Image: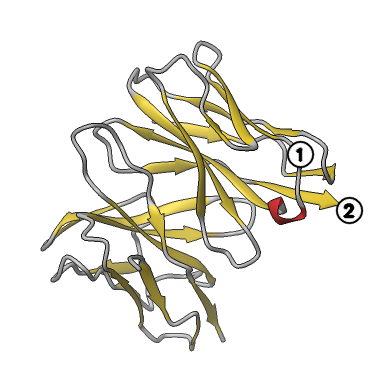
């Protein structure tokens, strides 16, 4: 079955460390997204990519970096510059269509905790 | 800028009853899409229903239906015959045609009482 796989499910980071969250999709979707979820704030967009080797900043990109070397993969690195990284991170993808907009497909998320 | 507001942080309903979750949005665009997503305790985001702004007819998916009031910029979700499995966080979201960013509301936590 097609879908989005995020790993790991839980991740612990020490102060000053960089960590990378994995996101892989086998849906042949063109666009991929990273969202951050905090209690009471809904989901906020960190980065997105419409095609391979191209990506754009979202609303809260500071302290994060991404790459898109393959269509299937869109890893997110949480750097030491991110002051409050403890959150739930969701990856999503979307198929670009000419006959309307398709809903996003989401992964199951990664819970990142700073220890 | 687009915004989505869900004014009900929490709602509860008796099993088999009907509940309506509210959502208002703001955009100056005329071509857009609205969505309701469900996030159960597993935290997987699941698409419940979507509505194209150009369609006057309200979308329905089995027990789920929406009341789309374009002039009022309102997009409420009605869940009929509530079931225990409907308990979850529900997010309203807006996507402008041609844009990339799905804008979410703050969410409404729905509890189903047996």
Name of the residue lying farthest toward the left: A53
Q: Which of the pair A27/A62 is nearer the observer? A: A27
Identify the chain of the residue marked 2, using the numbered disc in the image.
Answer: B
Residue B96 found in image quarter: top left
Q: Is residue A51 rendered to the left or right of residue B65?
A: left
- Residue A33: which disc? none
Identify the chain of the residue marked 1, using the numbered disc in the image.
B
**Residue B44 relative to residue B52: left or right:** right
Residue at 58 percent across and 27 percent down: it is: B66
Mark 2 surroundings within 10 Å by alpha-carbon count, few (fewer than 14), some (14 through 19), many (20 or more)? few
Q: Residue at x 21, y 40 (%)?
A: A97
- The residue that appears at 36% across and 83% down in the rendered structure is A18
Q: x, y (%) of residue A50? A: 19, 52
Mark 1 closeness class: few <14, some 14–19, many ≥20 residues within 10 Å: some
Going by the image, does A7 lie left or right of A93? right
Of all residues, the one furthest to the top in this rendering is B71
Report how far apart the C-alphas of labels 2 and 1 lie in the structure.
12 Å
Q: Secondary structure at mark 2?
A: loop
Quarter of the image that includes the N terminus of chain A: bottom left
Is there a contact, CB below 8 Å, between mark 2 and mark 1? no
Provide the residue designation for mark 1.
B81
Q: Please tell me whether residue B46 is drawn above or below residue B44 in the rendered image.
A: above
Q: Are marks 2 and 1 on the same chain?
A: yes
- N-term-proximal mark, 2 vs 1: 1
Could you say where residue B41 lies in the image, as x and y percent from the top left?
65, 65
Q: Secondary structure at mark 1?
A: loop
- In the displayed structure, A83 sits above or below B34; it is below
Front-lying residue, B91 or A87: B91
Q: Residue shown at 44%/41% (left/top)?
A: B103
Report which quarter residue B61 is drawn in: top right
Residue B10 pos. (x, y %)? 76, 45
Q: On the image, numbered disc 2 is attached to which residue?
A: B114
């Amino acid at each position: 079955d097609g879908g989005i796989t995020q790993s790991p499910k839980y991740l612990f980071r020490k102060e000053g460390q960089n960590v990378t969250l994995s996101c892989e999709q086998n849906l042949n979707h063109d666009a991929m997204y990273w969202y951050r979820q905090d209690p009471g704030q809904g989901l906020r967009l960190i980065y997105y990519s419409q095609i391979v080797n191209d990506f754009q900043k979202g609303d809260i990109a500071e302290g994060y970096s991404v790459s898109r070397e393959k269509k299937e993969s869109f890893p997110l690195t949480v750097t030491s510059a991110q002051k409050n990284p403890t959150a739930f991170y969701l990856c999503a993808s979307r198929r670009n269509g000419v006959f309307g907009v398709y809903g996003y497909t989401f992964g199951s998320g990664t819970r990142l905790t700073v220890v | 800028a687009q915004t989505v507001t869900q004014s009900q942080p929490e709602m509860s309903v008796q099993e088999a009853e009907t509940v309506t979750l509210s959502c208002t949005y703001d955009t100056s665009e005329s071509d857009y899409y609205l969505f309701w997503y469900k996030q159960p305790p597993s935290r997987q985001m699941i698409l419940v229903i979507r509505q194209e702004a150009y369609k006057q007819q309200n979308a329905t998916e089995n027990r789920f239906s929406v009341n789309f009031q374009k002039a009022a910029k309102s997009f409420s979700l009605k869940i009929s015959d509530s079931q225990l499995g409907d308990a979850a966080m529900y997010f309203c979201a807006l996507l402008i045609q041609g844009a990339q960013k799905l804008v979410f509301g703050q969410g409404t936590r729905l509890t189903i009482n047996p």
